[in-house]
Image: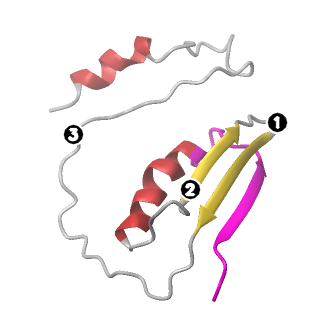
Amino acid sequence: MKHALRIVLRGITNDQIDPSVDVLKATALPLLKRFGIDGEELELKIIRRGMPPKGGGEVIFACPVKKVLKPIQYIDPGKIKRIRGMAYPSLNLFGQGVPPDSKSNGGFYQEHLE
């Protein structure tokens, strides 16, 4: 029997070039669950965030081994019901016009829904 995958990733977790670890957590994990990869062994845990240029972030990814994946049919993508955001402090961003909290930007997105 194969053992579940458990890896520790270190470095930059959030930058302007690549999808952040939060995007992967919000999109990849639900997709894996649709394929039948689920349970307590499936996890993407953010231990510490890392910003460019120094990094220093740490993420733990754990995934069980499945012999057979459940097939899925993705025909109707549906409508966008809401947009969520996440704010976290970073010394690199302060002083560059980025507000320290998400409340200041929430109204803009709410106007464009529905």
Mark 2 surroundings: few (<14), some (14-19) or many (≥20) residues within 10 A: some
Q: Secondary structure at mark 3?
A: loop
For marks 3 and 2, the one nearer the N-term is 2
Q: Relative to residue 68, is residue 46 drawn left or right?
A: right
What's the magenta bit mostly, secondary-structure-wise? loop
Question: Residue under circle 1?
Answer: 53
Percent coordinates x, y for residue 45 in the rendering = 62, 47
Q: Disc 1 marks which amino acid?
A: Pro
The C terminus, quarter of image:
top left
- Residue occupied by mark 3: 81
Q: Is residue 34 visible?
A: yes
Whether residues under marks 3 and 1 lie with C-beta atoms below 8 angstroms apart, the answer is no
Q: Which residues are magenta?
A: 1-21
Asked which secondary structure carries label 2, the reply is strand
Residue 6: image quadrant is bottom right
Where is residue 68 shown, x and y percent of the image? Answer: 44, 87
Q: Amino acid at mark 2?
A: Glu
Count the marks.
Answer: 3
- Residue drawn at the location 41% of the way across and 82% of the way down: 69
Residue at image position (42%, 13%) is 103
